[in-house]
């Protein structure tokens, strides 16, 4: 705790890093927040799997077709799909882990 408003905000901690202050939720004040986090977790898992699957389909289709490889516009789509796939594989697992840890579930 930061020491300020300790009676009003007992479920948050303030962390200081460089010149920034970040509030971190340490516990939920009500079940409503838990429900919102569970919904966000489910939506994030759905987005993760659909992003991996659909971007893989696009990459496979473009690389497997000689007609699509020849088009310049397909190259930009390929680059976008590769970056989306990399984002989904690198960032989403950490975000899903963070959400599940905030809820209090073990991985």
Image (spheres, rainbow, N blue to C red):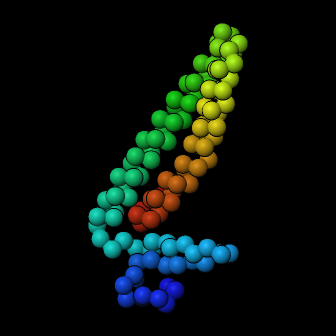
Tell which of 67 and 103 is nearer to you. Answer: 67
Please name the residue shown 64% across and 37% down the image. Answer: 83
Please name the residue shown 52% across and 86% down the image. Answer: 2
- Where residue 94 sits, quadrant-wise, is bottom right
Left or right of residue 7: residue 73: right
Please name the residue shown 34% across and 58% down the image. Answer: 36
Q: Is residue 8 above or below residue 26?
A: below
Q: Position of residue 78 (x, y in %)?
A: 65, 26
Q: Is residue 105 above or below residue 13?
A: above
Q: Position of residue 34 (x, y in %)?
A: 34, 63
Q: Position of residue 74 (x, y in %)?
A: 64, 20
Q: Position of residue 27 (x, y in %)?
A: 40, 73
- Where residue 61 sits, quadrant-wise, is top right
Left or right of residue 102: residue 20: right
Tell which of 77 and 33 is nearer to you. Answer: 77
Number of numbered markers: 0
Left or right of residue 107: residue 59: right
Res. 106 visible in picture = no
């Amino acid at each position: 705790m930061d020491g300020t408003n300790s009676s009003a905000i007992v479920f948050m901690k303030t962390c200081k890093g460089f010149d920034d202050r970040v509030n971190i939720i340490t516990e939920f004040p009500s079940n409503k927040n838990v429900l919102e986090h569970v919904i966000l977790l489910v939506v994030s898992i759905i987005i993760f799997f659909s992003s991996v699957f659909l971007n893989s389909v696009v990459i496979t289709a473009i690389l497997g077709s000689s007609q699509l490889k020849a088009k310049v516009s397909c190259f930009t789509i390929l680059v976008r799909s590769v970056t989306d796939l990399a984002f989904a594989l690198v960032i989403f697992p950490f975000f899903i882990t963070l959400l599940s840890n905030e809820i209090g579930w073990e991985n």
